[in-house]
Every structure is written in structure tokens, then in C-alpha cells.
Image: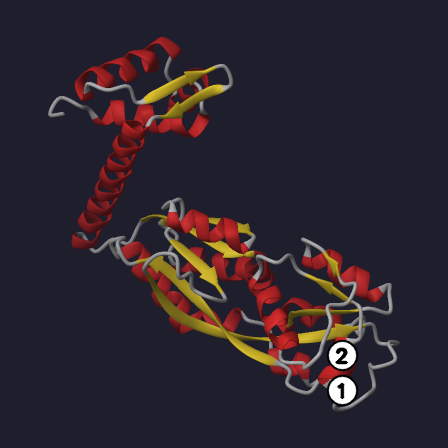
């Protein structure tokens, strides 16, 4: 394996990403024959086939997965070396990929803008998706840091708190319970809920909250993927929703939604910046996590103000 080149490793990484020689060649700015040659050379050096050629694409063999994992490690180590050398020069620059669950979008963009302003030489790429996809990106090293309400347990991670958030039940202002104080769990359990999908952390806490109600039977609730769709549905209906307070802060302040005074709520949770323990702490990642620790709270909506807006 001594004769394998970095260009060959980049070629097989591109083939994995695009599934075809043509797509890989286009991404690398090379011709298809050039990429084919790189693949043949690295397979000859390895002595095994690295990709299965099928009608609908190319897929890594077991040996291919092993070589691709090594290629990712080499690429990551070279990237780390570059940032380490910049650190010796007193320069903080480089690239960081950050993943965030969809609830974070209500404060992530201004936070990222502020970080980019403070560190103009650091290129930050932001991915906002559901929890399952965000955790998978962190697991596969597609992102460096994930912003989550609950660190994953499937693999070893570092998790640093950078802020707090609350989970509440909201309704339209004209809902029969909107002006009630001390709504019991049994009462709220009888309501029709618009809910996040089962893989979301918010849904996980809703299920826990409802499991505390003796004899409570699951009602005909409605699941929706989008928080915005849930908010619109609640505003137009007599149903309620279980959401993060900061995701409804604007609507509460505008009088479009009301936070219900339910016994046992709000549930107070924390936001975490999560990274893999087996991934080196580069100066760029350290700068981002330090920024979150010192300034992250400034970008969280005033949750207490939203909760105090209950009539």
C-alpha cells in the first residue's frame, strides 16, 4: 500500500459520494477515463476490488469500506495539520461543518453570522435537519459539531452545554383552556395534539410527560414534520401542540399563540454542542465551541418572557 497516492484516495471518495465515475469526475474536475485509471491503480495496489459495479451505480465492497475509512482519516489528519500549522502562525482559519436539529433554526442563523463576523477566516457550513439525520452526519464524520437537545448514546461524544430551552404546550388564544390556570395533566391529556415525528427529541419528552398520567390512553393525535406547519395548524384549529418555547416566541409575542399553564410544565432542557471524542479538537472547533460557551446564550430567545406571556 506504499504507492497509493492522495489523488487516488480523493478519487475513490468521490466515487463513493456520487455513485458513478462520471459524477466523481465532474466533482473533481477530471475526465471519466482519468478517474477510472485512478480506481484501477488503487485496486491493483490493494489487490482487491473496492467497488461493485451495478446497473444503478457503484457501491463499496467490504474492502472498499475499509480503504474509504482510511482515506477519511488521512484527509481529516491533513486538515488538522493545516489548522495546527496555522495556529503556530497565530492564525485561526479553516473550515467547520455544523449540524443542527430543526428546532435550532430559530436562533442558529444569527448565531452563525456572529461567529463568521468574529472569525472571518473560518468557513462555517451549516446543515439543519431532523435529529436522526444530524446524529448520522456526526457519526459518519460529515459534520464536526452537532447542536442537539440530547447527546447521542450510540457512540462516544463530548457534550458542552451552551444554553437552555423549555418545552411547553401552546394553543390559539381563543382555545377554551387559554385563560385557565393550573390545567391538570389529565385535562391536557384529553386534548388533540399536533406533534413532531417520533424521532425528534421534542416528541420524546412529550411521550415521557404523557406516560406520567395514570390510565392515559393515546388519543387521535396528528404528526407533522414541520414546526411551522404545526404552528399554523394550531392557530387555525382548536387543538394544541407540544413545542420548544423559543420556536413559538415570535407568535406568542404577536398574540397568535398562547402558552398554556399546565401543571408540570414547562420542562426545562439544555442545548449541547456535541462532537466525537475520537475526533481531534482542532483550533477551529475549539474556537467555535468557545464562542458558543461565551456568547451562545445571547442568541436564544427570551424563554421566560415567552412563558410569562400566559394571560
The image shows residue 171 at horizontal and vertical percentages of 79, 73
Q: Pointer 2: what residue?
A: 188
Question: Mark 1 packing: few (<14 Cα in 10 Å), some, or many (20+)?
Answer: some
Q: As drawn, is 17 to the left or to the right of 238?
A: left
| Protein image colouring | secondary structure
The image shows residue 242 at horizontal and vertical percentages of 69, 70
Q: Pointer 1: what residue?
A: 183
Is 163 located above or below residue 107 in the figure?
Answer: below
From the image, which quarter does the N terminus lie in?
A: top left
Q: Nearer the viewer, residue 186 or 151?
A: 186
Is 126 located above or below residue 30 in the figure?
Answer: below
Which of disc 2 and disc 1 is earlier in sequence? 1
Is 253 located above or below residue 117 in the figure?
Answer: below
In percent of the image, x 61 and y 58: which residue is there? Answer: 198
In percent of the image, x 67 and y 79: which residue is there? Answer: 306
Secondary element at tag 2: helix
Amino acid at each position: 500500500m506504499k504507492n497509493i497516492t492522495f489523488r487516488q484516495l480523493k478519487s475513490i471518495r468521490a466515487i463513493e459520494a456520487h455513485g458513478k465515475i462520471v459524477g466523481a469526475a465532474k466533482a473533481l474536475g477530471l475526465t471519466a477515463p482519468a478517474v477510472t485509471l485512478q480506481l484501477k491503480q488503487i485496486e491493483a495496489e490493494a489487490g482487491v476490488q473496492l467497488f461493485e459495479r451495478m446497473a444503478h451505480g457503484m457501491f463499496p465492497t467490504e474492502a472498499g469500506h475499509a480503504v474509504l475509512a482510511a482515506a477519511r482519516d488521512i484527509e481529516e489528519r491533513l486538515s488538522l495539520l493545516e489548522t495546527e500549522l496555522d495556529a503556530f502562525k497565530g492564525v485561526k482559519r479553516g473550515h467547520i461543518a455544523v449540524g443542527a436539529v430543526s428546532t435550532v433554526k430559530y436562533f442558529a442563523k444569527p448565531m452563525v453570522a456572529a461567529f463568521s463576523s468574529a472569525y472571518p477566516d473560518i468557513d462555517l457550513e451549516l446543515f439543519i435537519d431532523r435529529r436522526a439525520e444530524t446524529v448520522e452526519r456526526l457519526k459518519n464524520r460529515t459534520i464536526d459539531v452537532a447542536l442537539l437537545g440530547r447527546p447521542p448514546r450510540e457512540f462516544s461524544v463530548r457534550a458542552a452545554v451552551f444554553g437552555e430551552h423549555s418545552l411547553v404546550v401552546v394553543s390559539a388564544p381563543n382555545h377554551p383552556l387559554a385563560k385557565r390556570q393550573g390545567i391538570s395533566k389529565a385535562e391536557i391529556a384529553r386534548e388533540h395534539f399536533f406533534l413532531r415525528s417520533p424521532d425528534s427529541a421534542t416528541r420524546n419528552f412529550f411521550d415521557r410527560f404523557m406516560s406520567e398520567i395514570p390510565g392515559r390512553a393515546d388519543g387521535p393525535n396528528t404528526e407533522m414534520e414541520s414546526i411551522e406547519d404545526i404552528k399554523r395548524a394550531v392557530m387555525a384549529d382548536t387543538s394544541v401542540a407540544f413545542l420548544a418555547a423559543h420556536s413559538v416566541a415570535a407568535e406568542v409575542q404577536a398574540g397568535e399563540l398562547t402558552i398554556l399553564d399546565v401543571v408540570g410544565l414547562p420542562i426545562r432542557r439544555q442545548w449541547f454542542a456535541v462532537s466525537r471524542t475520537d475526533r481531534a479538537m482542532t483550533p477551529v472547533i475549539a474556537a467555535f465551541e468557545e464562542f458558543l460557551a461565551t456568547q451562545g446564550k445571547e442568541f436564544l430567545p427570551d424563554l421566560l418572557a415567552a412563558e410569562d406571556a400566559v394571560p
